[in-house]
Image: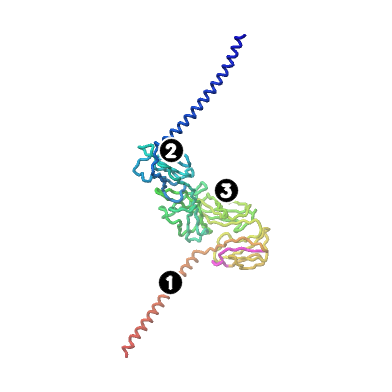
Amino acid sequence: MSGEATILITCEFGIFAINKCVLFFVFVFISIEILMKLMCLFVCSFVSSYLVETVTNKPVITRQPSWSQIFQGEKITLTCEVQGGEKTDWKYYWWRNSQSLPDNEKLLQFTASESFNGEYECMARRKVDFYSSTTWSEAFTVSVLRLKLVLSVSPSWLIPGASVTLICHTEPPSAGWSFYWFKAVPNSQDSYTYEPLPGTSSGTANNSFTVHGQTHTAGYACSAGRGDPLIYTQHSRPTFVWSSGVHPSASLTVNPDRVQHFTSESLSLTCEGNSSQWRLIQFLTDDSLLSFLPPATINGSTYIKNEAPRKAVYWCESGTEFSNAVNISTHSDGVILVSPVYPVPVGESVTLLCVMKTGNIPSDVFFYKNNKVIENERRGEMKISAVSESDEGFYKCQYNGRESAQSWMAVKVSRSESSSFHVWLIFGLVCGVLLIFILCLLWCYKCKKSELILTLKPLEK
């Protein structure tokens, strides 16, 4: 019995001893680890204090190019320059946003993108004396921006043969750019390809460019480049100059033929000309939003249901062809002005109507041209029996306190009339110059004659 008791006691003490040993070794292991860390800290501190020499040369970060703003895609070089240590062979260390970079060279080069934004620091150590190092440089901020190009055209609506001015804006505004100019050519993917305008392949220092002799609707775009080597931006969104004049190779017809429409009314747009594959473009003027409408499905025409008030310009495109453009606005209530969507030829008659949504034509209507009252018609219409160039302008009507939107009525001058006008204008100018020249000769002759008389009088005496 006593033997059995002894065995039990031994077993209990054995289990206790094992647990105690495990705890002891864990404690020893942790203590050794802490002691080693403390020794490392002491040694590192000792080495830093007595072995690593901090040299007085201070590194400075510079950037090339040195423009005030950096944009995505540009090639950037940061240089860690140790002042006064130009002849020393250094090993460099770079940090960005307090994180080490793998580069150990003097130059840090990259293509600018938003992922490279941050605070950069650098320091250097002598290669022959590893324990001699500089202090860290001052933080250098790199901020990469997105560049947006916006092209504007003036005028938006073309007078055939007139000059068109293109202006390429950089957003945000920045300097150092050369500008490149392109014509937007429709392609089959509901987008455009871009062909350089003549004489612009080398770029222009000015952000404006003038296109001469434009006669039809056309699209333009711009791009910009700077740096050495040149880094180019993407093209701007295409911007259009519109012509209302119809020409045989490409034309857009509207039914009903008027500028203003009520919502819920349907509108038929038909593309015609030298192509069998047209696409119809809608440009919302208030939102500057360009969209490609679905292909025509009914007798070659596209039908649009005007469900919401809006102002839009429509035109057709195919290959290199652009049709005339038409300005269409839709209105939910009130009155609208019925005016022609196409230019009215000189000498033809035109009738302007003021119409309610019910279709009724009210009486006692006031008509305005360029915001000035021109006529008070009890029949709700205004007729111009023979249109002249002076009739071109903005028209609107007013009935019972309700006023329509303004619509532009264009006047088409035939080439013969236009050319004869220019001939008479040149003839008048030439005659005026000749008359002034003859008068000058007569005046000179009179002066010389007076001088001659005064000279001869003493001789007679």
Are the residues flagged by discs 2 and 3 in contact, CB closer than 8 Å? Answer: no
Determine whether the residue tagged by mark 3 lies in a helix, strand or loop: loop
| Camera-nearest label, 1 or 2 | 2
Q: Name the residue under label 1.
A: 430
Q: Where is residue 383 in the image (x, y as percent from the top left)?
A: 61, 66
Query: Disc 2 marks which amino acid?
Result: Pro
Which residue is farthest left? 459
Looking at the image, residue 454 lies above or below residue 401: below
**Label 1 – label 2 distance at C-alpha:** 79 Å
In front: 16, or 392? 16
User: Where residue 294 is drawn, which disc sits there?
Assistant: 3
User: Which quarter of the picture shows residue 371?
Assistant: bottom right
- Which residue is located at x 45 percent, y 59 percent? 212
Percent position of residue 375, x then y: 62, 68
Magenta segment boundaries in residue numbering: 386-399
Residue in front for this viewpoint, 252 or 93: 93
Tag 1, which secondary structure?
helix
